[in-house]
Image: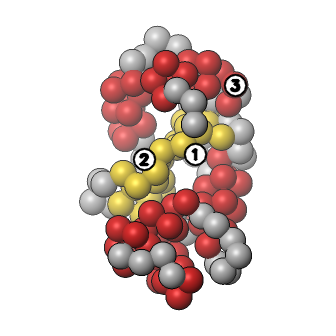
Amino acid sequence: MTQNLCLCHLQSDEIARQLMSLDAVALSPENSNKVPDHAGLYAIHERSGECLWIGHTNDLRDRIFNQHYNQGRDESAQSDLIRVVQEKKFKSTRPDTRAMAQEWIRENCVIRWFVLASERELRKHLKPIWGKR
């Protein structure tokens, strides 16, 4: 399910609208093979529609599943998405809430994405919108 889009002439609100109009895939490990290992823009949100995370990467599958989903499994690992869910849903970032946050993500979150030629192309186009970290 590769979803390609040229962002060259779109404004940020149109990019968001296009992204949210794509088919959603549940954010669970068994769906990792549905996400390509290409550069792209992605959104992780609740099934209800509340956006939890938007990002860009050179490897969609790795970023979404290895960094956002899996890196919260042990105390030493960090996942910004898991931390966001811990804060919003469990009101705590204690290590004992990581497994609960990961399960909540698995049951309640979906992902959508665009495949792009490269992350560099995306950064060049979105720099005026997102700026630097």
Kind of element beneath mark 1? loop
Disc 2 to disc 3, how far (Cα)?
25 Å
The answer to whether the residue labelled 1 contacts the one labelled 2, judged by CB atoms less than 8 Å apart, is yes
Residue at image point 42% right, 37% down: 19
Instruction: Tell me the quarter of the image containing the C terminus.
Output: top right
Residue behind mark 1: 1
Give how far across and how far down residue 129 sits, in percent.
45, 24
Above or below, 46 against 96 in this view is above
Left or right placement of residue 48 versus residue 11 in this view: left
Which label's residue is closer to the chain start, 2 or 3?
2
Residue behind mark 2: 23
**In the rendered view, how is the structure colored?**
secondary structure
Which label's residue is closer to the chain start, 1 or 3?
1
The three-letter code of the residue at mark 2 reads Asp
The answer to whether one can see residue 26 in this image is no
Disc 1 to disc 3, how far (Cα)?
22 Å
Label for residue 120? 3
Residue at image point 29% right, 54% down: 49
Residue at image point 46% right, 51% down: 53
- Callout in the foreground (1, 3): 3
Give how far across and how far down residue 117 sits, in percent.
69, 26
Category of crowding for the residue at label 3, using alpha-carbon neighbours closer than 10 angstroms: few (below 14), some (14–19), many (at least 20): some
Kind of element beneath mark 2? loop
Most foreground residue, 50 or 74: 74
Disc 1 to disc 2, how far (Cα)?
9 Å
Left or right placement of residue 26 versus residue 78 in this view: left
Give how far across and how far down residue 124 sits, in percent.
61, 18
Label for residue 71? none
Give how far across and how far down residue 3 sits, in percent.
55, 36
Q: Residue furthest top?
A: 9
The three-letter code of the residue at mark 3 reads Arg
